[in-house]
Image (tube, coloured by chain):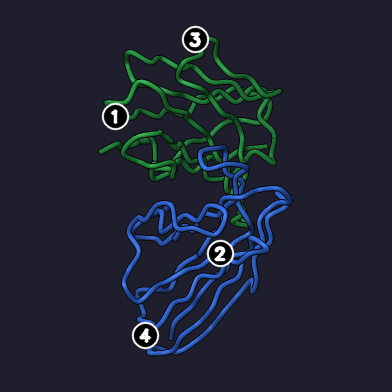
Chain colours: A green, B blue
Amino acid sequence: AQTVTQSQPEMSVQEAETVTLSCTYDTSESDYYLFWYKQPPSRQMILVIRQEAYKQQNATENRFSVNFQKAAKSFSLKISDSQLGDAAMYFCAYWGYGGSQGNLIFGKGTKLSVKP
Amino acid sequence: DSGVTQTPKHLITATGQRVTLRCSPRSGDLSVYWYQQSLDQGLQFLIQYYNGEERAKGNILERFSAQQFPDLHSELNLSSLELGDSALYFCASGEGDLSTQYFGPGTRLLVL
């Protein structure tokens, strides 16, 4: 079965600085997708970024980028120029065609605080 | 705003009762997914419907059931409620059977 591990329960960053959130996963599938979702205090789940496993190029969305290391099964999220609005829980999620049958498998999340 | 709507936003009920949560997917999306988020279990997949048919099942209790209607909205029915069912229930929708999922705002259920 696929698993997703986020080893940092909490992280803190100074406003305007850069922070990296870690995620590792375990799978025997070769084709899959990885996601980062953000959950602010409103509890809404917001899609931050998506990475297709078959693409070697790391995904980027404005201030958010990933470092995808397929062999190492690592998928970290880098937030540049951190803003107060980035404070939230961040969940890494796996999605595959096989055993997970298209549903998302989530890590336990990392709580990010942004200091002014 | 993801375009996925869920009602009600909040629900308070008593043990043993039955409730229905409703979800309307984004326009054009055929898949609806239900997730439960609790403090001890984290985010867990419950069930998926695609174009009216059940497609995948996760850790959904027998007391829980769901369906997707011809207009593609979905309902999650929770019966014989227990204290441990208190959680945030999310609906997500996706364009196809296997596609990026966009989440609704959730329904917060409190069982007293």
Task: Give left or right: position of A69 versus A55.
Answer: left
Residue A108, above or below B41: above
Q: Which residue is mark 1?
A: A26
Asked whether the residues under the numbered discs 3 and 2 touch, taking CB atoms below 8 Å apart as contact, a structural biologist would say: no
Q: Earlier in the sequence, mark 1 or mark 3?
A: 1
On whether disc 1 and disc 2 are found on a single subunit, the reply is no
Asked if the residues shown at circle 4 and circle 3 are in contact, with their CB atoms under 8 angstroms apart, the answer is no
Residue at 51%, 67% (x, y): give it. B67
Amino acid on which the number 3 mark rests in the picture: Gln
Element under disc 3 = loop
Picture quadrant where residue B104 is located = bottom right
Asked if the residue under mark 1 is in contact with the one under mark 4, i.e. CB atoms within 8 Å, the reply is no
Residue A111 at x, y = what percent? 49, 43
Q: Which residue is mark 2?
A: B68
Chain identity of mark 3: A
Chain bearing tag 1 is A
Q: Is residue A90 left or right of residue B2?
A: left
Residue A56 marker: 3
Q: Which residue is mark 4?
A: B80
Label 4: how many Cα within 10 Å (few below 14, some 14–19, many 20+): few
Question: In the depicted view, which residue is nearer to us: B100 or A93?
Answer: B100
Image spot of residue A19 (x, y percent)? 54, 25
Label 1, label 3: how far apart the Cα atoms are: 18 Å
Residue drawn where x is 38% and y is 90% of the image: B16
Mark 4 → mark 1, Cα distance in angstroms: 36 Å
Neighbour tally class for label 2: few under 14, some 14-19, many 20 plus, Cα within 10 Å: many
Which chain does tag 2 point to?
B
Label 2's element?
strand
Query: Which tag is nearer the camera, tag 3 or tag 2?
Result: 2
Q: What kind of residue is marked 2?
A: Gln
Mark 1 on the same chain as mark 3? yes
